[in-house]
Image: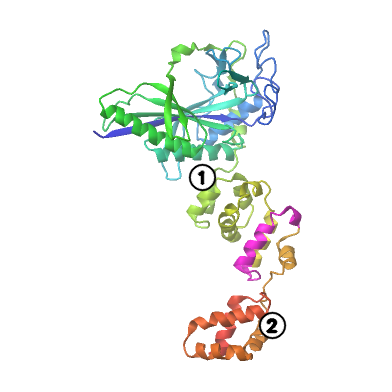
Amino acid sequence: MKYTPTIGIECHVQLCTKTKLFSEVDNDARRKEPNSCVSPVDYALPGMLPRLNGEAVRFAIRAGRAMNCEINAYSRFDRKHYFYPDSPKGYQITQFYHPIIGAGYVELPSGTKIRIEHAHLEGDAGKLTHFSDYSLVDLNRVDTPLIEIVSMPDIHSAKDAHDYCKELWRLMCFAEVTYGDLYNGNMRFDVNVSLAPEGSDKLGTRAEVKNLNSFKSVERAVEYEISRQKKILEAGEKVIQETRGWNDATGKTTGQRSKEEAKDYRYMPEPDLPPINLSEEFIETESKKLPLMPKDYREKFAGIIPNDILEILLDYHELMKKLNEIDNKYVKIISNLFASVLLAEEKSAEYLNDLPSAKDLIELAEMNEKKELSSTATKEVFLRLFDPQMKGRGAKTIAKELGLIQENDLGALEAIVDAVLAKPETKKAQEDFKAGQEKVIGFLVGQVMKESRGKANPSAVQEILRKKLA
C-alpha cells in the first residue's frame, strides 16, 4: 500500500529584545553564568507580578507581517500548567485562545505556499542539563520572549520541510526580530509527522519530533519518521501518538513520552496580565517598519544574479543589505566574488560580520571592468578588503601596494611586445604561429607577461601579438 506523509511544523523563535518578556532582565544570556540572569519574577517569588515587554509586541507584529499574516487587534495570555523542574511557576505564560498573529502563509523558493495557522507570544522555559544520576537547572532562559509559529499540515516531503524551515529562518532574520543563531537555540523546530493511505481524507496518527535546531536535522528526522511509520503500518500495527527525540549521530528518533492533549495542561486565562488591545494605527505603523524580505531581493536581482547563487547569498542578511546599496551594473561581479571566493574561505562567517563599504566594493568592480585588474588580482584585492590591517584603504590603494594593477596603455604594451618578438628565443614560436599552430600564442603572451613583471593586460597583449604576427 502507498502512503501519503503529512507534516506540520511548530517553530519557536526567540525574539532579540533587550530584556525578557515579563521582567527587566538581560535577554541575551547565552554566554552568562547559569542562573545569573534571573529576577524574582522569573523564579516565581510569591507576590511578584509579570509586566509585558512592549518591544516583544512590536517584534511579533513585524514577524507576522513577514509571514503575510493577519495581526489580531485583540489578544490575551493564558496559563499552561505543567510541572517540571525547568518551570518554577508550575505553568507557562502563553497565548492559547487568543494569539496575536493570525492566519498567513510562507512561500517557498519553489513557489509552494505553506499556510500558517497562527503564531503566539509566550515565555520560554528554563534549561535542564542531565548527568548520569542527577540534573541541573539553569533558569537564565526562563521567560525569554518567544513566538511559536504553527503551520498547517501542508507539507508532504522531507525536502519541503527543510525548505520551509530555512525560508522561515530567513524571514525572521530579515525582519530583524531574532538573532537567528540556530546553534544557540534562537530557533527550534518541533516536527509532526503522520502517514495515511494514499487518497484517504483522514490524517494518520502523528508523532512529534522535538527541538530540532538545523534544517538538515529536520529533513533527516522527517525521512526517518516516514520510514519508521511505514514499516509499522505495513506490519499491520498502529503508530503511537507520542513525543520523540532526535539523535543526530545515529540518525534515528526515539520515544520519550506519550503526547499530552490540551486538556491535560489545564489552560486558564492569565489573571496578572491584561489583554492586549492594539489600534489599527499602531499595527500599521509597526508593519511599515518591515525591511526588505527575501522575496523583495529575488525580484530586485532577478536576471542580474543567477538564481543558484542568489539562493546561497540569501542565507546572509547583512550581505544582501550591502548588495542593495550597490548599483545593479556591479552587483553581478560582486555577488560572484562573495559566492565563489569569500564563502569558500574557512573564516567566511567571521568575515561577514564586518563587510567592506559599498564604495570599496564598487571601486573594485570598476577596476575589474576597466581591465585594470585581472580576475585573479580582483579576487586577491577582494579578500584583502576584509583584512583588518587594510580597512579603509580602498581597493585601488590596495591594488597599487600589491603591484597588481595591469598595464593597459597600448603604446607601452606594444613596446614590450616588440621587445619580446625581437628576442631570438621567441623566433621559433613566431614561425609556428604563422604556420597555424595557435597554441603557441600562450607561450608568447607568457613571455610578455614575464617582461612586464605580470602587469600587462593579457587580453590586450594577445590582440597586439595577433596583429603583429598576421
Q: Looking at the image, tell me whether mark 2 or mark 1 is earlier in sequence order.
A: 1
> x and y percent of residue 292 in the render?
58, 43
- Viewer-side label of 2, 1: 2
Give the amino acid at mark 1.
Lys
Classify the position of the N terminus by image quarter.
top left
Query: Within the image, what quadrant is residue 368 found in?
Result: bottom right
Which image quadrant is residue 14 in?
A: top right
| Secondary structure predominantly adopted by residues drawn in magenta | helix
Residue 167: x and y, percent?
50, 40
Name the residue: 52% across, 51% down. Answer: 310
Q: Is residue 396 above or below residue 126?
A: below
What is the magenta range?
A: 368-392
Instruction: Please tell me which residue lies in front, 337 or 238.
Output: 238
Q: Quadrant of residue 451?
A: bottom right
For disc 2, the marked residue is 412
Rounded to the nearest whole Å, what is the CA distance between mark 2 and mark 1?
Answer: 49 Å
- Answer whether residue 315 is visible to the viewer in this image: yes
Q: Which residue occupies 59% across, 80% down?
A: 445
Counting labels gives 2
Measuring 67% from the left and 55% from the top, which residue is drawn there?
358
Tell me the tag on residue 295.
1
- Locate residue 260 relative to residue 19 in the image: left or right: left
Task: Mark 2 and mark 1 in contact? Answer it, CB < 8 Å.
Answer: no
451 left or right of 301 in image: right
Q: Amino acid at mark 2?
A: Ala
Query: Where is residue 208 drawn, in percent x and y?
Result: 43, 26
Residue 195: mark in rendering: none
Between residue 68 and residue 357, name the one nearer to us.
357
Question: In x, y percent, where is residue 69?
Answer: 50, 32
